[in-house]
Image (cartoon, grey):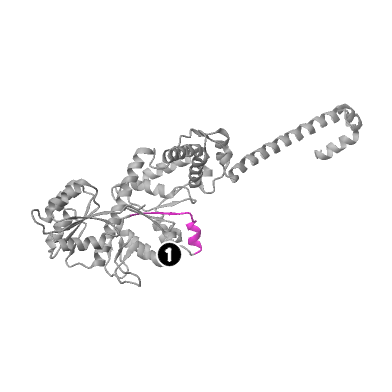
Amino acid sequence: MTIKANILVVDDEPDLRDSLRLLLKDRYTVHLAGTGREALDIIKRGPIDLVLLDVRLPEIDGLEVLKMIKGIDDSIEVIMVTAVITVGKAVEAIRHGAYDYITKPFDIESLQEQVANVLEKRKLLKENISLRQLIGREYQFEKIVGKSAEIREVFKVIDDVAANNATVLITGESGTGKELVARAIHNRSPRRDKLFVAVNCAAIPENLLESELFGHEKGSFTGALDRQIGKFEIAGGGSLFLDEVGTLPLPMQAKLLRALQQREIERIGSSRPLPIDVRIISATNFDLRAAVKERRFREDLYYRLNVIPVVLPPLRARKEDIPVLAVHFLKKYNSEFGRKIKGFNKEVMTLLRAYDWPGNVRELENLVERLVVLTKGSQIGPEKLPSEIKGELAKAAESSGNRLDKAVRNFEADFIRQAIDKAGGRKGRAAKLLGIHRNTLRGLEKKLKM
């Protein structure tokens, strides 16, 4: 169930208040106030995400109400509404924390677009704050778990690169935790109080990528019913994470390169450059060097993105971390599902360490979640493991059996050689010493390839 955002409309005109309530009530929970004092009382009583605040109000001026709102909760976004506004008033409102202003009579579509944009930005900011609190509470090094030398080297690189603004390219197989590393870099950087905005380049249709990254103006193409702010603008002052950057089509690569070089973007349908202040962190599971050689990825963009490379090892290359990760995920899902499973039995842990984990850490986490749900006792046994992991036990047993067979064959061959040597090379006498028929000895020599 999606929780609706709370919007407070503050205006001394009852008709306008009612009109805005009717316009917004389907998508948001709308509260109404006719004076500044009423507005402040509502804000003190419950969570408000956005205030549409008239500049001219009885008793207390709108700008004064704005200051008081920010004094109660600085995270509440405020859009000023007025019939006429001077440049001075607009600048003063923005200086005191207003997100933007609109003038009456306002365009309905523009208002809806502005409300949607500010609430989306607030949602992202809240998610970032929640994630930082979670990380600070629960994890040793951000949200990345491990003790192996390979992962400790990654921790060191994160600490080394976090403090500057250089672009970072994270490479690694799917499921190795590339976004976690990107978030760790952001959370340890001077930009930590601004937004971390993630974009999965592979998940966005090619014809929408430019709009998603740079935004567009209303009417700039068929279907552009409202202005849209792009991810570069939303991430202003923070970090923009371009996941699966290797999937970008060549025309989009050229536009991204220009944005990085010029430090500015243009929305589709606009000729006005907008300066940008974002740190770019990219990730890929592709071999971009090979893609450059095959002319599927621009060489100049590759070097622009790869100023600081971070390489994530696959889980099979750091098997020392598998028990640590398994216990970490067990604790997480015990808490989430209200279970009290104490741990994994020895056989399960042996199998987990033997498996190659083609899906890496993500596959391990998904498995532990499933085992927590399905396990009835106090300890996780091998019964609920998938066949591909239980197959590792059979492989191990087969390997062990093969080693035993080889040892037995070697022992038999040595024993027969000693008997033949003792018999002076005479096979009949050697057979007697061994207590077997001469033909049996011949058969053993053939079997043991003597």
Please determine whether, in this image, residue 103 is positioned above or below residue 237: below
Q: Who is closer to the viewer here, 231 or 413?
A: 231
Q: Residue furthest left?
A: 59
Q: Who is closer to the viewer here, 189 or 41?
A: 41
Looking at the picture, which amino acid does disc 1 mark? Pro
User: Which residue is depicted at the point 14% across and 61% down?
Assistant: 13
User: Which residue is depicted at the point 40% across and 44% down?
Assistant: 157
Percent of width and height locating residue 291: 49, 60
Percent of width and height locating residue 85: 13, 64
**Rendered-image quadrant of the C terminus:** top right
Percent of width and height locating residue 206: 42, 66
Percent of width and height locating residue 444: 84, 36
User: Which residue is depicted at the point 71% across and 34% down?
Assistant: 404
Whether residue 100 appears in magenta in the rendering, the answer is: no
86 on left or right of 278: left
**Tag 1, which secondary structure?**
loop
132 on left or right of 436: left
Q: How many marks?
A: 1
Give the crowd class for mark 1: few <14, some 14-19, many >=20 residues within 10 Å.
few
Whether residue 284 appears in magenta in the rendering, the answer is: yes
Q: Quadrant of residue 423?
A: top right
Asked if one can make out residue 248 in the rendered structure from this viewpoint, the answer is yes
Please determine whether, in this image, residue 177 is positioned above or below residue 208: above
Asked if one can make out residue 188 in the rendered structure from this viewpoint, the answer is no
The magenta segment = 279-294
- According to the image, label 1 marks what residue? 205
